[in-house]
Amino acid sequence: MLLKKLLATAALCGLLVPAAALAAAVDTLTPGTAAPNFTLPSQEDKPVSLTDYKGKWVVLYFYPKDQTSGCSKEAHNFQRDLPKYEALHAVVLGVSLDTVESHKTWCAKDGFSFKLLADPEHKTIDAYGVPVKTVNTPNGPLSIAMRQTYLISPDGKIMKQWDVKDIDAHSADVLATIESSKK
């Protein structure tokens, strides 16, 4: 895991990393492998674990920062589609490096009813291999998780992973994957 982090950091800093070295270091969660369990606090400051959702589809999405434009659009799309997820026996869980307090404020402001999980210590973000980068802000450097989503099957296995590029279509893509997997 440490080698993977070092190589990912080097690549983010613009250093050339041989593809073979990166491929050898990445211990990816490929479809069919067991999803790492986690326990993180939600916006209600209550612990949420992957095992709480055994028997359900879990959409575990990682995002950069609460109350930013792209993250707000992504969260609102998941909220809009929540009845469709519920009909498919699926839950949506968002994870970022933000705090419980930040999640609580954002959920109250924007009316999100699904769980947002706080991972300021990178435990789950690291377990899922989500890249983290540092951006410069007027208030100093800020670490953010990159936008990735994992679909976890009802038996706790990784079904699919997305490096999210098209925020507008992402929720529909996830729903379509769940629907096609149930056939």
Image (cartoon, grey):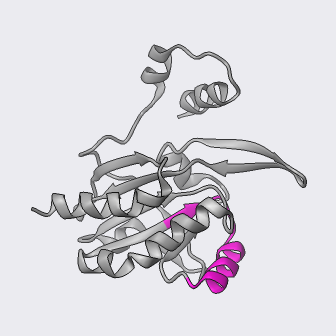
Report the side of 150 relative to 61 (left or right): left
| Quadrant in the picture for residue 179 | bottom left
Residue under the image location 9 percent in, 62 percent down: 183
- Give the residue furthest to the left: 183
Q: Quadrant of residue 73?
A: bottom right
Whether 97 is among the magenta residues is yes
Please provide percent x and percent y for residue 137: 84, 50
Q: Which residue is located at x 90 percent, y 52 percent?
A: 138
Verify whether residue 53 appears in magenta: no
Label count reads 0
Residue ranking furthest to the front: 168
In this rendering, the answer to whether 146 lies above or below 118 is: above
Give the magenta-colored segment's residue range: 94-111
Q: Please name the predominant secondary structure of the magenta segment in the image.
A: helix
Q: Is residue 122 above or below residue 83?
A: above
Say whether residue 169 is left or right of residue 159: right
Give coordinates of residue 145: x percent, y percent.
61, 50
Q: Residue at x 35, y 53 (%)?
A: 35
Q: Is residue 97 visible?
A: yes
What residue is rendered at 63% in x and 43% in y? 132
Q: Residue 122: x, y in percent?
A: 61, 52
Q: Is residue 118 visible?
A: no
Q: Is residue 118 above or below residue 47?
A: above
Measuring from the top left, give residue 46's x and y in whole percent.
55, 80
